[in-house]
């Protein structure tokens, strides 16, 4: 898949100011939404957004497209900054203690990103032969040994190792596109 945000981040790493302006124009509304949702105060969210882009400019060289999409990286920076700011706020005391209970459910944005990644993974699994996809799931999701998988599929142990290695390479190639 083409990732225009990743391309812009790479150009920012090379100190390309025009790319940075384009990156800001294309992503600032989404990041502002993330910050507003977390910080609940527009002025603080605007300050945080400025700090996010300062960090992006300074750390663009650290972005690794092999580890995730560009927008995901930007959202992680914004989210981490918002968490830091929330932790730095003075604690409000309450008698009932409910203000200290955190909501463990992921936000809508996190769920959408996860659903997109899960869909991509499922699509990539569909490119594998059914037996090989089953073997990969058995080994890496169900914890089955190579020997168990070889017996289950009726193939020699070294064949099973080859299936798994080639299938993982095919999955990686599919996810990288």
Image (cartoon, rainbow, N blue to C red):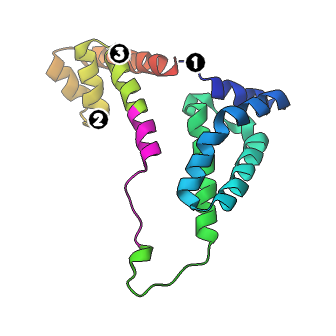
Image quadrant in which you'd find residue 146: top left
| Picture coordinates of residue 169, whole percent (x, y) | 44, 18
Tell me which segment is drawn in magenta.
Answer: 101-115
The residues tagged by marks 3 and 1 sit, at their Cα atoms, a distance apart of 30 Å
Sequence-wise first label, 3 or 1:
1
Q: Residues within 10 Å of mark 3 (few under 14, many from 20)?
A: few
Which residue bears the numbered disc 1?
2
Which residue bears the numbered disc 2?
141
Instruction: Say which residue appears at 77% left-offset and 47% top-offset.
Output: 54
The residues tagged by marks 2 and 3 sit, at their Cα atoms, a distance apart of 18 Å
Residue nearest the observer in this picture, 150 or 71: 71
Instruction: Say which residue appears at 52% left-offset and 17% top-offset.
Output: 177
| Picture coordinates of residue 112, whole percent (x, y) | 42, 38
* Drawn side of residue 140 relative to residue 80, left or right: left
* Drawn side of residue 96 relative to residue 146, left or right: right
Q: Secondary structure at mark 2?
A: loop
User: Viewer-nearest of labels 3 and 1?
Assistant: 1
């Amino acid at each position: 898949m083409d990732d225009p945000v990743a391309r812009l981040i790479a150009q920012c790493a090379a100190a390309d100011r025009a790319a940075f302006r384009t990156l800001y124009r294309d992503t600032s509304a989404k990041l502002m939404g993330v910050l507003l949702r977390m910080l609940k105060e527009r002025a603080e969210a605007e300050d945080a957004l400025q700090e996010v882009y300062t960090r992006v400019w300074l750390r663009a060289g650290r972005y690794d497209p092999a580890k995730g999409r560009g927008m995901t990286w930007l959202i992680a920076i914004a989210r981490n900054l918002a968490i830091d700011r929330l932790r730095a706020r003075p604690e409000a005391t309450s008698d009932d203690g409910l203000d200290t209970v955190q909501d463990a459910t992921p936000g809508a944005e996190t769920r959408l990103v996860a659903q997109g990644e899960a869909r991509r993974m499922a699509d990539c699994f569909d490119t594998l032969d059914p037996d090989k996809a089953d073997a990969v799931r058995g080994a890496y999701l169900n914890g089955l040994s190579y020997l168990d998988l070889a017996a289950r599929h009726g193939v020699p142990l070294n064949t099973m190792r080859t299936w798994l290695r080639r299938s993982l390479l095919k999955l990686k190639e599919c996810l990288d596109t």
